[in-house]
């Protein structure tokens, strides 16, 4: 089934063939110059802070000739008591052809997709899911490691509160990777299935070909999960010493934003295995591929 007109609310909605098609299209888009602006409009509604995801959707829409219309909830009529539903309906009535939505409440994008006639793309709903981050991460693994099948992906840190972890685990397993997690016992997800639990970071780094660090989601934690960030860093932080255990051909990833000195020591940003900015760059092309498929952007004239 084509993606045209469909919402993307959960990474599990995509079949492997959808993902493969998006990835080969993303690769082609990487070679392109941006299209002149056409007539389609992408609405952006972000109720939680974002640097990469929002900017990436904006860059992606510029690349395929779609205008982006970003509504800042703190400056909108939401502050006057208007509901999210009425705000989204207003964006639709203004002429948006699709809506990208980030909110702290799990499932809110589903609710909006039932209400709106235009497709909704979930750009992060609380701790539940972040499907486009999973797509760009899998694309990066494919590009950098040559395959996803058989890759050994280690997720380190706050698995419990991380929507990035949840969507990544689902997609990577579906695409044939082995996935392991390494986290403090208070930050494990008790409902995770089919994922190895490694006893300590050293063991995990010896095993992995891809090491994906996760930000400590302090804004979602209850405050008792770790004694202190310093103690967390001592046991679960990636530093140069620990990286000696990690294969020289492996890659280091982090969805950002990262906290220097917490989940990673600053020196590892210089490590040749660091792919954090490659992830950011790939996000633009993967989102461009997804948007153009969902919004039915006419790519005629682009030599694809
Ligand atoms: C993440 C998010 O907001 O879910 N960042 C991102 O989208 N690149 C991860 C995080 O906030 O830790």
Image (cartoon, grey):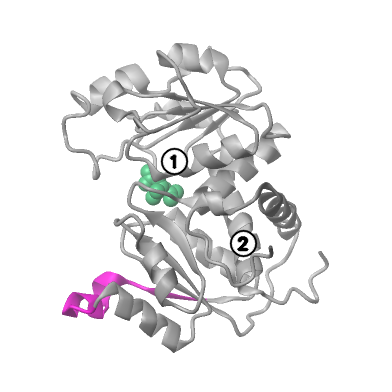
> For this rendering, which residue is in front, 301 or 9?
9
The residue nearer to you, when weighing 46 against 2, is 2
Q: Is residue 244 visible?
A: no
Picture coordinates of residue 84, whole percent (x, y): 29, 73
Query: Which of the two residues, 213 or 168, is positioned nearer the viewer here?
Result: 168
Q: Position of residue 226 (x, y in %)?
A: 22, 26
User: Does the beta carbon at disc 1 come under 8 Å from ligand 1?
Assistant: no
Check if mark 1's residue and mark 2's residue have beta carbons within 8 Å.
no
Whether 173 is among the magenta residues is no
In magenta segment, residue 74: yes
Q: Tell me how far mark 1 sits from mark 2, CA to CA.
A: 20 Å
From the top left corner, tell me how far across and down residue 128 is, in percent.
Answer: 38, 48
Split into 4 quadrants, where in the image is the C terminus? bottom right
Question: Helix, strand or loop at disc 2?
Answer: helix
Q: Which quadrant is the N terminus positioned in?
A: bottom right
Q: What residue range appears in magenta?
A: 68-82
| 208 up-or-down from 43: above or below | above
Q: Is residue 229 left or right of residue 296?
A: left
User: Badge 1: how crowded within 10 Å, few (<14), some, or many (20+)?
Assistant: many
- What residue is at 37 percent from the left and 41 percent from the top? 162
256 w.r.t. 214: above or below: below
What residue is rendered at 19% in x and 75% in y? Answer: 79
Which one is in front, 219 or 98?
Answer: 98
Give the residue drawn at x 50%, y 28%.
Answer: 194
Residue highlighted by disc 1: 166
Q: Which mark is residue 266?
A: none
Q: Quadrant of residue 182?
A: top left
SS for callout 1: helix
What residue is pinned by disc 2?
Answer: 290
């Amino acid at each position: 089934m084509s993606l045209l007109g469909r919402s993307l609310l959960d990474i599990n909605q995509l079949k492997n063939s959808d993902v493969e098609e998006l990835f080969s299209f993303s690769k082609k888009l990487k070679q392109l110059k941006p299209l002149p602006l056409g007539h389609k409009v992408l609405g952006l509604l972000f109720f939680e802070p974002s640097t990469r995801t929002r900017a990436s959707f904006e860059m992606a829409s510029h690349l395929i000739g779609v205008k982006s219309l970003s509504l800042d909830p703190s400056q909108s009529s939401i502050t006057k008591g208007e509901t999210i539903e009425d705000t989204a309906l207003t964006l639709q009535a203004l002429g948006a052809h699709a809506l990208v939505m980030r909110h702290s409440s799990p499932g809110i994008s589903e609710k909006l997709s039932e209400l709106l006639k235009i497709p909704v793309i979930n750009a992060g709903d609380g701790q539940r899911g972040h499907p486009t981050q999973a797509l760009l991460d899998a694309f990066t693994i494919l590009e950098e490691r040559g395959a996803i099948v058989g890759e050994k992906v280690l997720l380190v840190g706050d698995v419990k509160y991380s929507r990035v972890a949840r969507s990544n685990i689902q997609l990577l397993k579906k695409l044939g990777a082995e996935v392991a997690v390494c986290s403090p016992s208070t930050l494990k997800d008790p409902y995770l299935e089919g994922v190895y639990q490694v006893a300590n970071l050293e063991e995990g780094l010896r095993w992995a070909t891809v090491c994906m660090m996760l930000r400590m989601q302090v804004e979602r934690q209850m405050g008792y999960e770790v004694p202190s960030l310093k103690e967390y860093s001592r046991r679960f932080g990636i530093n140069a010493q620990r990286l000696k255990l990690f294969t020289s051909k492996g890659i280091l990833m982090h969805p950002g934003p990262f906290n220097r000195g917490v989940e990673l020591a600053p020196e590892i940003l210089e490590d040749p295995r660091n792919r954090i900015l490659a992830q950011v760059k790939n996000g633009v092309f993967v989102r461009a591929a997804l948007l153009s498929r969902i919004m039915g952007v006419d790519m005629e004239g682009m030599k694809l």
